[in-house]
């Protein structure tokens, strides 16, 4: 089995996780910028983090034969502070020409506040003005449905955005339809708690088809499983699905979406 | 759908049974405890009613039962976390 892990926060993971992912067949992974579990104090903190994403993690991944790609942003959890967000947005262009940068992400909303929406609009403008792809984080739990609707409105409002170059991550049964209907790609995040289980992720493939969809682990410093994608592939096999469909979901689909950036080379 | 109904039961019945008993035990635990509950318990009980729905959208309907149904952004995010159920306007 070969697979692409399209959403993993490897700065939070051990080297053993890289080894396990490589052993399971991971050939490439993508690491969007995210919240560290605490609010960073300045744009310089983000500059250091972006160096970690563009210099350090690619080397760690390469030690295990895994290609490492990244997305840059200030996460919506830190977007309430508009001044900090403006500072970080001014830093991002310094890193846009790094060879493993695929675009802007994971941007989006957390609590669906007015400031979060303003910062989301600024990120979308940054992506559009630099012809970058976008990776979107949708809010969790009770905030997801409303937040997804608000995010889709922001994206639709900017006529420069090609929906097929936008991945909306963390979709669930109540948001997957609106994301696909808007022409975007959808990501299902496989978490041991609070997000989508392997069984539900396969259910959604069975119900909505396999076009413009991927699975990811989004493994980070919380309860999460770096091997969630291959384990879900095994469960899909237990259900009797064809190998070609499994390969499409865990390898071909992410490859197709990510290859819209010339930098994504396996 | 790759599986027959029989195979679905073979593969998932024990897991679903386990989770259902856990929910029953959770509700017993809440009832045994002292003090007031909050909006989450009502949301949970409302969501459970969606399990009796006919059709194939129970997961969707349960998710919607916990969701914020409003359309306007909130003024300010005072925290970062979500609690799993919408507390209602003004909470």
Image (cartoon, rainbow, N blue to C red):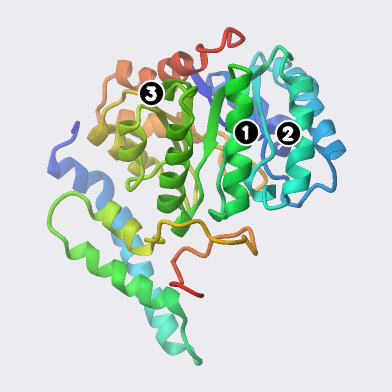
Quadrant hosting residue A108: top right
Give the left or right position of residue A46, taking residue A182 as reference. Answer: right
Q: Which residue is mark 2?
A: A89
Q: Nearer the viewer, mark 1 or mark 3?
A: 1
Task: Examine the rendering and report whether any part of residue A82 can be seen.
Answer: yes
Task: Examine the rendering and report whether any part of residue A30 can be seen.
Answer: no
Q: Position of residue A158 (x, y in %)?
A: 49, 30
Q: For this rendering, which residue is in front, A247 or A212? A: A212
Precedes in sequence: disc 2 or disc 3: 2
Q: Which residue is mark 1?
A: A123
Label 3, secondary structure: give it.
helix
Name the residue at 12% across, 57% down.
Answer: B54
What separation in Å lies between label 2 and label 3 (alpha carbons)? 33 Å
Name the residue at 66% across, 13% down.
Answer: A65
Mark 2 residue crowding within 10 angstroms, few (<14) / some (14–19) / many (20+): many
Precedes in sequence: disc 1 or disc 2: 2
């Amino acid at each position: 089995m070969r697979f692409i892990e399209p959403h993993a926060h490897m700065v939070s993971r051990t080297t053993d996780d890289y080894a396990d992912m490589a052993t399971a067949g991971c050939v490439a992974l993508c690491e969007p910028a995210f919240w560290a579990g605490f609010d960073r104090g300045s744009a310089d903190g983000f500059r250091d983090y972006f160096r970690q994403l563009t210099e350090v993690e690619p080397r760690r991944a390469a030690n295990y034969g895994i290609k490492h790609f990244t997305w840059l942003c200030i996460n919506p959890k830190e977007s309430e502070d508009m001044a900090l967000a403006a500072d970080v947005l001014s830093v991002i262009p310094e890193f846009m020409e790094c060879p493993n940068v695929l675009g802007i992400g994971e941007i989006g909303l957390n609590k669906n506040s007015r400031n979060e929406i303003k910062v989301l609009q600024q990120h979308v403008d940054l992506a559009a003005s630099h012809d970058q792809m976008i990776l979107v984080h949708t809010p969790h739990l009770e905030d997801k449905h409303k937040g997804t609707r608000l995010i889709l409105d922001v994206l639709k409002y900017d006529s420069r955005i090609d929906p097929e170059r936008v991945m909306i991550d963390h979709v669930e049964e109540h948001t997957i339809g609106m994301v696909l209907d808007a022409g975007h790609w959808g990501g299902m995040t496989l978490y041991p708690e609070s997000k989508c289980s392997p069984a539900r992720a396969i259910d959604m493939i069975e119900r909505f088809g396999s076009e413009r969809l991927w699975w990811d682990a989004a493994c980070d410093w919380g309860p999460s499983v770096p091997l969630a994608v291959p384990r879900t592939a095994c469960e899909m096999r237990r259900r009797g699905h064809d190998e070609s469909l499994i390969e499409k979901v865990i390898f071909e689909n992410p490859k197709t979406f990510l290859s819209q950036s010339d930098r994504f080379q396996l | 759908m790759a599986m027959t109904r029989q195979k679905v039961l073979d593969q998932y019945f024990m897991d679903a049974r386990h989770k259902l008993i856990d929910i029953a035990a959770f509700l017993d635990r809440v009832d045994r405890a002292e003090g007031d509950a909050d909006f989450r318990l009502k949301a949970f009980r409302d969501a459970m009613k969606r399990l009796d729905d006919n059709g194939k959208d129970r997961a969707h309907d349960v998710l919607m039962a916990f969701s914020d149904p409003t359309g306007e952004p909130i003024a300010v995010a005072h925290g970062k976390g979500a609690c799993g159920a919408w507390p209602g306007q003004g909470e």
